[in-house]
Image (cartoon, coloured by chain):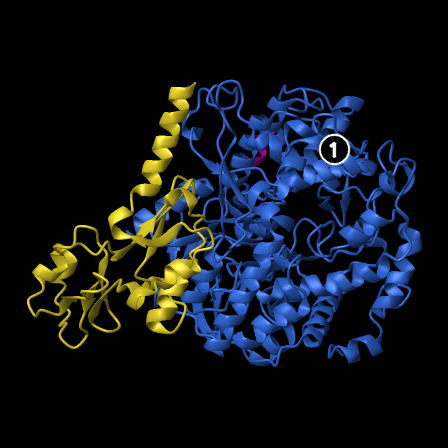
């Protein structure tokens, strides 16, 4: 079963534990500026929205890369950047419509979510289950069920 | 280790900006944040200096755990000499600013002197400068935040700023960061304004490393699990769950502390915030976390659009920081108001203009009592009848105080000075000139002792005698828990974590996190002793500033007028019984001065 990261903004409190867990996993220190997942706040904190790479099947970043530095992990579906092959040209950064592959000025390469080898640390760190790692073929089921419940209540009333 | 090892000294008179090495010996003796900031203050200024003069020093300090993944790690403190009390000021805040300062490479920011023209400090990676602030002088907190981000094309900047109240010298102006988190008490924003420093804007792209990463990750996870078992109520209801407890107990200061229970408490409590009214409006929208916090007690609320406060002011038809217990108390019971939308709006105004809600509300309460006595009239109050319970008076005066207009200038003096000016000092509900929080000292005896001996004046956050106070309503046995919890709270504050973890974590739990985090061989004992050292250094600052035993007292209303209702009906605060015992336990003389033995034992000699 291929799984994907599922974000539920309504559960996010904006605590940034995910950013710290991600940066610790990849950089060995707490450095949110280098986190592959970011949380954005809107309207004085009314909503906090976590955001990271969706691991597109036909990935813009991969197609744009002139050195074939981006490959697919066939088990996880993750798109991985080879630090050896990446030349830091940023073509992928321009190609990605979501902004979820970023240039790292310290390494001269690009960073993106790699799903932590199948054990995403942002998921483990989230105190409210706003980020979960679920069956990629059923990531809409939770919301579908909620909508169905509401529809059921409206029908009943 | 988690320290960056660097502080930033900013001289506003000369505009010199100098990075310096962090004094690690001090960090080991004073932990960080509150304690370390106090040590830097002590070593860098004369406590006798006028709080508004250039030789006052303003410090922004992080703790060793700030910016790590320990839960509640987002805190920083502002330490300076207070223009409200003349004593030391130490106000801490959450949000994201504190962690950002650490990520920018600085453990502590020390601001001295006074700029000739308004400036703001910009720290953007390794580019640090003092930029002209003429265009934002006179702007609100919210406008300033937006302007600076736009000016530098950097939405990632985290900004701590003052509003108009701080620029114009209201004595309890706050420093607001991230739009609605504040270093609220004692006028730390007033000092910032006196220095012509409008804001500090920081973007930090660096990281924080810990001493023993593997151990640290294990222990912080264990501590988060433990915390989650204890803080469900805070997450769900926020701090305003306290309203019902105090109402039931009879410790809810009402109408300027004339009463201890408020008939409208259930209209401004946590449940009222969650209730959906007949138009489908619910005050509370969601809860909100500060940086790194797995509790998330913060409230995000909105106001009914047809409410009189905002019906013609669309600019407030958005969500923002909602009521906490202290704001609900200060805009509710203590002034007799039970209109939750008006209270929420007053909260918006406090953040927008940078004012301490507790001091504002309790000062307004005194003004209302003066008004009802006929000492002041609508001629003094810009035509606004200041009767208890008048919600419009609350919001109009909040705005006037925020902008320092009309009677708002008088309210901006604080309760002590205002009541003195009108010839009724006995109506000022303050200690050392700082207004009380929402706990009545007649119902909560140890709280009264904590207020009276508080180094920043009346304050509910620097000790914790809540349980013993609820168990027994005499002055017996309160000195020890008061002293011990004062020391312990000083240690907790200094760690860079939030005191709302104290219900779940004791000294061993803090020490375990701190020892994996940074050098210092941290143990529970070492932390407690450091806390006591910090408390005594704050005391020494106050004594050197000219405060005496006479300042360790409570208003006569709490010492002589018995509580009219509730569990403490007929009781007054027994301070005269508790205070000598407290001095003795502290190792202080009868005059409240630390003895040479005490100073020697704590390494303060």
Q: How many marks?
A: 1
Give the colour of chain A: yellow
User: Label 1: which residue?
Assistant: B366
Which residue does the image show at 66% across and 61% down from the upper left?
A: B49
Is B542 left or right of B59, judged from the image as shown? right
Q: Residues within 10 Å of mark 1 (few under 14, many from 20)?
A: many
Instruction: Indicate whether A157 appears above or below B127.
Output: above
Magenta stretch in the rendered image: B397-402
* In the displayed structure image, the side of residue B30 where residue B204 appears, left or right: left
Task: From the image, give the main secondary structure of the stretch colored magenta.
Answer: helix
The residue sitting at 87% across, 41% down in the picture is B556
Foreground of the two, A104 or B6 = A104
How far across and down, in percent of the image, does residue A151 sit?
A: 36, 26
Does residue B456 belong to the magenta stretch? no
Q: Position of residue A74 (x, y in %)?
A: 18, 65
Residue drawn at (26%, 65%), measured in percent from left and top?
A114
Query: Which of the 4 image quadrants contains residue B595?
Result: bottom right
Which color was chain B given?
Answer: blue
Q: Residue at x 39, y 28 (%)?
A: A150
Residue B62 visible to the viewer: yes
Toward the viewer: A131 or B537? A131
Closer to us: B295 or B78 = B295
């Amino acid at each position: 079963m291929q799984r994907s990261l599922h974000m539920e903004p309504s559960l996010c409190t904006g605590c940034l534990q995910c950013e710290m867990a991600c940066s610790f996993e990849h950089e060995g220190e707490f450095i949110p500026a280098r986190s592959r997942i970011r949380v954005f706040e809107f309207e004085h904190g009314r909503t906090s929205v976590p955001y990271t790479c969706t691991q597109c099947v036909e990935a813009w970043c991969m197609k744009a890369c002139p050195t074939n530095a981006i490959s697919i992990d066939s088990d996880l579906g993750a798109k991985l950047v080879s630090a050896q092959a990446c030349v830091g040209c940023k073509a992928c950064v321009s190609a990605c419509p979501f902004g979820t592959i970023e240039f790292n000025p310290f390494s001269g390469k690009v960073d993106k979510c790699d799903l932590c080898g199948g054990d995403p640390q942002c998921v483990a760190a989230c105190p409210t289950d706003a980020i979960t790692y679920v069956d990629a073929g059923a990531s809409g089921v939770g919301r579908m069920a909620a909508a169905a419940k509401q529809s059921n209540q409206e029908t009943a009333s | 280790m988690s320290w960056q090892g660097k502080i930033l000294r900013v001289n506003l008179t000369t505009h010199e900006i100098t990075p310096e090495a962090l004094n690690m010996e001090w960090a080991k003796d004073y932990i960080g944040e509150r304690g370390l900031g106090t040590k830097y203050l002590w070593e860098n200024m004369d406590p006798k200096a006028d709080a508004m003069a250039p030789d006052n020093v303003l410090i922004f300090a992080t703790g060793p755990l700030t910016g790590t993944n320990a839960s509640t790690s987002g805190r920083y403190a502002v330490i300076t000499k207070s223009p409200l009390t003349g004593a030391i000021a130490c106000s801490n805040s959450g949000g994201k600013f504190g962690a950002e300062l650490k990520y920018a490479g600085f453990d502590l920011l020390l601001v001295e002197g006074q700029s000739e023209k308004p400036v703001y400090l910009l720290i953007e990676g390794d580019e640090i400068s003092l930029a002209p602030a003429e265009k934002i002088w006179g702007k609100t907190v919210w406008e300033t935040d937006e302007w600076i981000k736009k000016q530098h094309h950097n939405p990632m900047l985290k900004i701590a700023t003052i509003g108009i109240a701080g620029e114009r010298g209201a004595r309890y102006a706050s420093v607001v960061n991230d739009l609605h988190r504040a270093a609220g008490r004692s006028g730390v924003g007033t000092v910032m304004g006196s220095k012509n420093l409008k804001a500090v804007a920081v973007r930090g792209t660096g990281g924080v490393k810990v001493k023993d990463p593997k151990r640290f990750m294990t222990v912080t996870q264990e501590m988060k699990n433990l915390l989650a078992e204890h803080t469900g109520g805070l997450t769900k209801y926020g701090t305003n769950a306290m309203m019902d407890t105090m109402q039931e107990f009879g410790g809810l200061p009402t109408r300027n502390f004339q009463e201890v229970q408020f008939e409208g408490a259930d209209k401004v409590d946590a449940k009222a915030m969650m209730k959906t009214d007949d138009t489908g409006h619910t005050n509370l929208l969601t809860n909100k976390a500060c940086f790194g916090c797995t509790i998330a007690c913060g409230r995000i609320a909105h106001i009914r659009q047809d409410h009189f406060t905002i019906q013609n002011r669309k600019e407030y038809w958005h969500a923002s920081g909602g009521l906490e217990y202290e704001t609900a108390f200060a805009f509710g019971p203590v002034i007799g108001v039970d209109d939750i939308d008006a209270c929420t709006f007053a909260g918006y105004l406090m953040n927008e203009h940078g004012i301490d809600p507790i001091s504002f509300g309790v000062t307004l309460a005194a003004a209302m009592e003066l008004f009802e006595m006929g000492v002041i009239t609508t001629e003094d109050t810009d035509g606004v009848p200041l009767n208890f319970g008048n919600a419009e008076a609350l919001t109009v005066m909040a705005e006037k105080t925020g902008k320092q207009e009309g009677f708002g200038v008088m309210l901006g003096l604080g309760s002590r000075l205002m009541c003195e000016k009108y010839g009724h000092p006995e109506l000022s509900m303050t200690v050392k000139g700082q207004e009380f929080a929402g706990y009545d000292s007649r119902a909560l005896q140890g709280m009264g002792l904590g207020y009276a001996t508080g180094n920043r004046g009346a304050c509910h956050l620097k000790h914790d005698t809540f349980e013993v106070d609820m168990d027994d309503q005499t002055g017996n046995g309160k000195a020890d828990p008061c002293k011990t919890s004062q020391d312990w709270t000083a240690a907790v504050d200094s760690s860079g974590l939030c005191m709302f973890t104290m219900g779940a974590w004791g000294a061993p739990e803090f020490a375990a996190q701190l020892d994996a985090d940074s050098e210092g061989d941290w143990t529970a004992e070492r932390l407690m002793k450091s806390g006591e050292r910090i408390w005594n250094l704050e005391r020494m600052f106050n004594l050197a500033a000219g405060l005496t035993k006479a300042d360790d007292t409570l208003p006569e209303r709490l010492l002589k007028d018995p509580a009219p209702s509730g569990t403490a009906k007929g009781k007054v605060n027994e301070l005269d019984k508790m205070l000598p015992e407290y001095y003795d336990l502290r190792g202080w003389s009868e005059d409240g001065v630390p003895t040479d033995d005490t100073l020697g034992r704590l390494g303060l000699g």
